[in-house]
Amino acid sequence: MQADWAQLFEELDASNKTNDKVAALLAYLNVASDKDKLWLIALFTGRKPKKPVKAMDMRTWAASAANVEPWLFEECYAVVGDIAETIALLFESKNTGETLQFSLAELMQEIVQMARFSQDEKRHLLQERWLQLDKNTCFLYNKFLTGGFRIGVSQQLLVQALSKQLQKPAPEIAHRLMGNWQPMLHTFEELFLHDLANQEDAKPYPFYLSYPIESDVSELGDIADWQAEWKWDGIRIQLIKRNNQAFLWSRGEELISENFPELIASAYHLPNGTVIDGELLAYKNQEALPFNLLQKRITRKKPSAKMIETCPCAIIAYDVLEFEGIDIRGNALSERRKILEQIIAQNGFGLIQLSPVLDTGNWEMLAKLREESKSQKAEGLMLKRKSSPYQNGRKRGDWWKWKVNPMHIDAVLVYAQKGHGRRADLYTDYTFALWHEGKLQTFAKAYSGLTDKEMIEVDQFVKKNTLEKFGPVRTVTPQLVFEIGFEGLQESTRHKCGVALRFPRILRWRRDKSAEEANTLEELKKLI
Amino acid sequence: MQGFGLIQLTAKGLYCAEGDFYIDPWYPAGKAIITHGHSDHARLGQTAYLSHPITEKVIQHRLGSVQTETLDYEKERMINGVGVTLFPAGHIPGSAQVRVRKGAETWVISGDYKCHDDGISEPFVPVNATHFISECTFGLPIFNWKSQAEVMGELNLWWQQNAALGLQSVVFAYALGKAQRILNSLDTSIGNVFGHGAVLAMNDTLIAAGVKINPCLTLQNATKEALKGALIIAPPGANGTPWMKKLEPYRTAFASGWMAMRGSRRWQAADRGFILSDHADWKELNSAISATNAEHIYLTHGYKSVYAKYLQTQGFDALELDTLFEGESLKSNSKLEENHAS
C-alpha cells in the first residue's frame, strides 16, 4: 500500500499540537518507502529541487486551462495570497472525479526532470497534472513547483519523529540532517545508517539558537556565571576546516563558500578538524559596517576583487564546536572559549576575529554598555551561561539574546488594503504617514503587530471611513495613530519621503493620540 | 439604481419610495421587509417588520416585542400599489428573496441565498426579474462547494475519530441556520449531541415556527459520562472563552465557506475546517443570475467589484452597491455572536 503523503501534510497543517504532528509523522515514516521518506525529509529541511517553471508561466497556463481570464485569476490570487492554493482551488471544480495517486518520490523526481523540458512540454504536463490531482495534492504539488513550500513543521519536530522511528538520539539525527546531501544522489541508508565519522567533510553541526530574554537580567543570578558578548547584526555562520578543505555555511544551511573566497582563504590556515560558530559581518579596520553592505555580498557568487574591496567582510568567532577532529559541543562554554581563544591567538588572521567578551562585573554596568549597541552596530547583547554545552536548535535557559529596544515613531494610518491568506477578509495591510510641511507624507508600510481584536476594529474603521478607492487600496480619514517600531533607517533616494526603514512594524495603537499629535518626518530623519 | 427606479439605495438601506418601505435597512428607517433573521439584515429600530412566518419568530426572539406581520412564500401583497412577494432563498429557514414589482419593472432582492438543498431551508427558487440585487459573498471562481452529503460525511468521520480517542468534538457554526443544518445531518449513532445555550434557544424558536430539528441536549448539569465523545455545537464567538472549559478534552472545528482557504482555516486556530456555507458558490451565483433573465444586476456584500467586472465581461449590466451587509463572516464581533441567550 502506498503511504498517503498528502494526507500527512494535511494533518500536519491542520494540527496545532506538537504531539499530534509527531504522531502523524511517525505513522507515515513507519509505512513509507525509503525514497519517499528521503524526499519528505528533504522538503522539511529546505532541500527543494530547482524551480522548473516560472511562477508567471504557471499563472498563465493555469488561467487558460481553468478557463478563467487572466485579470480574474489575478484577483483570485490577490484574495488567496498564494499561487499554489489559487490554482488548486480553481481546478477543484474542473477535476472530473477520477484522481490519480502519485507517490511523493514520483512527483518530486518528475519535478527535478521537468527542468530539462521545453516550455510546451512543461505546459502540457502541468495542465494534465492539475486536472488529475485532488485539491490537497494539487496544492502541495504547486508548492513544490514554486519552491515556496513551508508547513508548520519545525526541524526539531522532524528530528523527534525520526529519532523515535530510527531509535537514535535526537542530537545525532539533527547532525545527520545537516549538510550537503541531496535526495536524488543519496539514499536514506547512507544518510541515517552509515557511520557518522565517514560522513562528508562539509557536514556542519546544527546551530544553537537563543530566545529573547523575558525577565529582568538580574534574575539570571550571579553575573560571574555568564559570558556577555555583542549580538552582532550580520549573518550567523559555521566555518569548517577538515582534510585541507574549508567550507562556509549560513544558518539557513546554505553553502556560501563561493561568495566569500577571501574568508575561505583565511580559513585554510586553521588546523584541520576545526569547526567555528560565528557571525559574518561587513567589517573594516576593526569596525562593523552597515548590514546593507553585507547584503550585496550574500547574493553574489564569485565576487570581483573590487567587490571584495568595497564590501570587505570578516568573521567574528563566537564558539568552537569541533577541535582536532573531535566534537566538543558537550564541553562547557568556558572550556570551548579557551580553545577558541587559543586557535585564534595561534593563527591570528585578520579576517577571523574573536568576539570580545564584555566583562563589566555587574548587571547595571552591563545594561549601560548595552545602550551603546547601536554605535557598535550591534543589535544588543548575548548572554551565555559559562557552563552551557552547545545545544541543538532554539532552546531556553542557557543562552539569551538581550536586544536593545527598537526605534519608534508615532504615525497616522492613511491607506489600507485587504490582507492575504488568513487575513483575506480584513483590511490589515497599512500604509502610515508623518507630518511634513503641514501635510501627511507616507513613509512606511506595516502588516503586523496588532492583536486579532484590534485588527478587526481597524478593519471596521477602514470600512466606515473610506475616502477613496484605488483598486484594492482604500484611502481612509487620517485619524488613527500607531507607534511604528523599526530596527534601523537610512537615507534613500528611492523613497519619496527620503528614508527607508528596516523591519517596520506596529508596536501599539496610540488611542491616546490624535492625528495632529503624530510625529513629523523631520523628527524621523533626526534618528538617522 | 442610480436611475432611481422602483428601488433606490439610501443612507439607511434599500428603499422603495412608491411603496414607502425598506428592505433590510441597517438604520432605523420605517416599515421594513426582512429577507431573513441574521442580525445584519434584521436590525432593531424599524416601525414594522414584514417577513416570512419563520423569520417573524426569529425577529421576535432576537429583537423582542416589535410590530411584525407575515407573508407566506409566493403570495403577492400590494403595498401602496406596489406588488411584494417573497420567494424561498434557500439560505436559512424562513429566508426569502423579495420581489417588488410595478408596471414594467420587476425587482428581486435576493438577500442571502444558496442554490443547493440543505435539507432544512425551503430550496431556492429562481424568479424572473428586470433588476436583480444579488449578494456575492463568494463571487470568485475559487469557491466551489462540495455536496452537503460529502462534507457532512467528513464531519461525521472526524467526530467518530475524536470519540474513539475519548475526545469531545466542538463545532463552531452560526446559531441560526448553520447549526440546525448540521444538527439535522449528524450521524447520531456516534454519540450524544449538545448545544450551546444560543443554539438551543434558536432551536426552540425555529421549532415553534414549525421547522423540524433533530433533538439536541443542554449542557446544564451534563455529566462527564454523557459528554464523553459527544459533539457540541456552539456559535463561533464561544471559541476561546471560559465556557469551553467544561468541554475538555476536545477538538474544535469551524463550519464555514471561508474554510476553503488555508489561511482562514489556520487563523481560526481550530483543529479542522469544514467547507459548509449558506451562501452561493461561484457556479450557483452565475446560474442564479442567469436564471432571473434580469437586464440589470446589482451586487452587495463580498467580492462585488470583481464580480461586477466579471458579469460585465459576460454581457450583463452589473453594478456594485455599497451596503452594510456582512455576508458570511468569521469575525468574532459580528452576527456570529448570538451569545445573549447562553
Image (cartoon, helix red, strand yellow):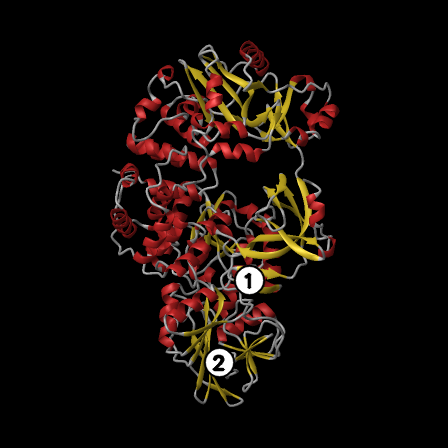
Is A421 situated left or right of A68 in this image?
Answer: right
Q: Disc 2 versus disc 1: distance between alpha carbons?
A: 25 Å
Res. B71 mark: 2
Q: Is residue A36 above or below residue B37?
A: above
Res. B335 mark: 1
Query: Where, by quadrant of the figure, is residue A168 drawn?
Result: top left
Quadrant in which the C terminus of chain A is drawn:
top right
Disc 1 chain ID: B
Q: Please tell me which residue is depicted at 43% across the width and 22% down the height of the picture.
A: A175
Looking at the image, how many numbered discs can be counted on the residues? 2
Query: Does mark 1 fall on the same chain as mark 2?
Result: yes
Do the residues under discs 2 and 1 have CB atoms within 8 angstroms? Answer: no
Instruction: Confirm whether residue B62 shows in the render.
Output: yes
Q: Nearer the viewer, residue A307 or B159?
A: A307
Q: Secondary structure at mark 1?
A: loop
Q: Secondary structure at mark 2?
A: loop
Q: Earlier in the sequence, mark 2 or mark 1?
A: 2
Quadrant in which the N terminus of chain A is drawn:
top left
- Circle 1 crowding by C-alpha within 10 Å: few under 14, some 14–19, many from 20: many
Report x, y in % for residue A65: 30, 56
Report x, y in % for residue B240: 56, 48
Is A402 situated left or right of A146 in this image?
Answer: right
Q: Nearer the viewer, residue A164 or A495?
A: A495
Res. B186 mark: none
Disc 2 chain ID: B
Report x, y in % for residue A347: 53, 11
Q: Is residue B251 above or below residue B102?
A: above
Going by the numbered disc 1, the residue's amino acid type is: Lys
Going by the numbered disc 2, the residue's amino acid type is: Leu
Q: Nearer the viewer, residue B46 or A388?
A: A388
Query: Where, by quadrant of the figure, is residue A287 drawn?
Result: top right
- Circle 2 crowding by C-alpha within 10 Å: few under 14, some 14–19, many from 20: some
